[in-house]
Image (tube, grey):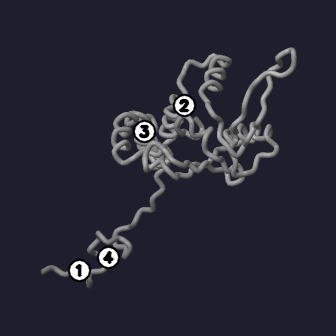
Amino acid sequence: MHAAIRNPLIAVVPLDLVGSVITVGKSKTDAGTGRVIPINDHLMKTLLSWACQFPDRKPAEFVFPYERYGTAGDDFVPCVYDTDPSRPIGSWKEAWEKARRDSKVECRFHDLRHTGCTRMLEEGVPFQVVAELMGWSAATTVCMAKRYGHIGQQSLRNAVNSIMAAAEKSKQKPKTKPQIEAGSFDNPFDPGSNEELVSVN
């Protein structure tokens, strides 16, 4: 959700935890391929916590590495072996399903992408910026503008309401404008202020 990327990308692309960015490789669209997504603070803390479990991992390697599972000894104790951070995890779906059951969350992984998109728009992020982060093609951007067009209406309403609020504040201010006396040169509407400059054609 905090990167608003498609289902498997968080698991199968290398993450630059030093530069705090995700560089997307091959994506569903040409617009999405190769895009760079900044990692926010919340996601960074989570990824660093997980990456610490693989002390031999290099910066350019995968945070979710390939590994195998089995049982050891006569007691058949579950164990993990052949961990290889240079290769991505084989399947993320089983891990997601277990995490969803444990947390009692009823949603699809892809729903998190929609949630991230919605929250950005609700906070007033320009639609074109959101489209770039999401990796939408030009055609998809048009379709998504219709789907998400209702989002952010409260921000727009707050904006126009600020006009009335400003008007109300101006009414409350005391009127202290200086009065310009008749005959004064400072009054451009007083012909008597400088008779030599007044001419009638």
- The CA span between labels 4 and 2 is 72 Å
Within 10 Å of the Cα at label 1, are there few (<14), some (14-19), or many (20+) other Cα atoms?
Answer: few
Amino acid beneath label 1 = Val
Q: Residue at x 69, y 52 (%)?
A: 60
Q: Which is more N-terminal, label 3 or label 1? A: 3
- The CA span between labels 3 and 2 is 32 Å
Q: Which is more N-terminal, label 1 or label 2? A: 2
Q: Which residue in the protein does label 1 denote? A: 198
- The CA span between labels 1 and 3 is 47 Å
Q: Which residue in the protein does label 3 denote? A: 161
* Front in this rendered view, residue 4 or 72: 72
In the shown orientation, is residue 50 left or right of residue 117?
A: right
Within 10 Å of the Cα at label 2, are there few (<14), some (14-19), or many (20+) other Cα atoms?
Answer: some
Q: Quadrant of residue 143?
A: top left
> Which is closer to the viewer, label 3 or label 2?
2
Amino acid beneath label 2 = Leu
Q: Dot 4: what SS?
A: helix
Amino acid beneath label 3 = Asn
Amino acid beneath label 4 = Ser
**Relative image position of residue 171 (x, y in whole percent):** 44, 44
Q: Are marks 2 and 1 in contact (CB under 8 Å)?
A: no
In the shown orientation, is residue 177 left or right of residue 51?
A: left
- The CA span between labels 3 and 4 is 44 Å
Q: Are marks 1 and 4 in contact (CB under 8 Å)?
A: no
Q: Dot 2: what SS?
A: helix
Q: Residue at x 87, y 20 (%)?
A: 73
- The CA span between labels 2 and 1 is 74 Å
Q: Which residue in the protein does label 4 denote? A: 193
Image quadrant where one finds the N terminus: top right
Q: Residue at x 52, y 51 (%)?
A: 35
